[in-house]
Image (cartoon, rainbow, N blue to C red):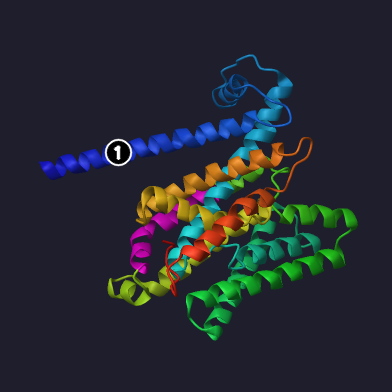
Amino acid sequence: MNLARSRAMAGARLLGVVALSVALLGATVIFGATIGETQIPFHTVAATITNHLFGAGYPVDTIDAGIVWNYRLARAVVAAACGAALAVSGVVLQSLLRNALADPYLLGISAGASSGAVSVAILGLGGGLLTLSAGALCGALLAFSLVALLAVLAGRGPTAIILAGIAGSQLFNALTSFVVTKSASADEARGIMFWLLGNLSGVRWPDAWMAMPIVGLGLAVCLLHARSLDAFAFGTDAAAALGVPVRRVQATLIAITALMTAVMVSIVGSIGFVGLVIPHAAKLIVGVRHVVLLPAAALVGAVFLIGADVVSRTIIAGQVLPIGVITALVGAPAFALILVHRPSGAGGTAR
């Protein structure tokens, strides 16, 4: 009886947490839609959403409704999807590699995805979102393969993979710059360079419809492997002894991480430090069990990137900063703290 009651209470708590999380995310999205160069009241945003979703017919100014639905809400949804995808990717990479500093940006995955997307666009191989995403995915997988090979050749210590990732990032950033300089016009080059720093200015609902299913798929796949990720905390040998098919799990999770990163890069460009900082913040809130950590990181990442987007649009009147600038201002000091406080000689979770 006590066991049944405990399970019921645990289920009720879980439902409560899920409901609270969904409410928090929805409130954050609406908050992001109210703020901008033109302030739009909360009730106007709420009425616009209700009209579009349920055909309520509330009277709303046409211009305000267009700004809210076509621009700000689409932007907030894409920011949420991107933040969730990068945060989940960071959790997975840190667990698989047992390295507190691992994330798609530092491991060169984002740089490879950027190179792939830019090459596809500039070389005339296609300009659609699916084509850009395919190019970004190829670049991301190639970059991680080269980084992993270099890390193996240099040694299997936790520092090797990070140093290899930094080298890979520089290589693919240089390749991207070369392709842009060689093949793009001056106007195209300026636009691409701004996009590479993370740019949500041009996103619309088609981008959101592309991003949201990928995040949902990625989170679902990672949750299916939550127990395996818990086992990786003890090392690959221990995970194998516990019955985890190590190679298959590694290949599956690296592929889904590369897919999420590639799609987000093809939509908004390269955004650094989200996959590094957010997993550690989520661990402080919910602990290290991946069945809870993964959705928590997705939520925190979504809220964080919506907030970063709001700051990027409002910190300088009349101008929009690349969102990657804001995440770097937060992420760089956090990176230093994680580097200083992680266990000596280990790649594990920061203390």
Depicted 267 relative to depicted 169: above or below: above
User: Quick one: 280 or 125, which is closer to the camera?
Assistant: 280
Residue 100 can be seen, yes or no: yes
The residue that appears at 23% across and 38% down in the rendered structure is: 9
The residue that appears at 45% across and 33% down in the rendered structure is: 23
Residue 275: horizontal and vertical position, in percent? 54, 57
The residue that appears at 61% across and 24% down in the rendered structure is: 45
Depicted 197 relative to depicted 141: above or below: above
In the displayed structure image, the side of residue 316 where residue 80 appears, left or right:
left
Chain part drawn in magenta: 213-233
Q: Is residue 222 magenta?
A: yes
Locate the C terminus and report the quarter of the image it occupies: bottom left
Q: Which residue is mark 1?
A: 13
Tell me where residue 200 sits by quadrant. top right
The residue that appears at 69% across and 71% down in the rendered structure is: 170
Q: Is residue 128 magenta?
A: no
Residue lying at the far bottom of the rendered structure: 153
Residue 208: horizontal and vertical position, in percent? 61, 43
The amino acid type found where label 1 is placed reads Arg
User: Quick one: 147 or 350, which is closer to the camera?
Assistant: 350
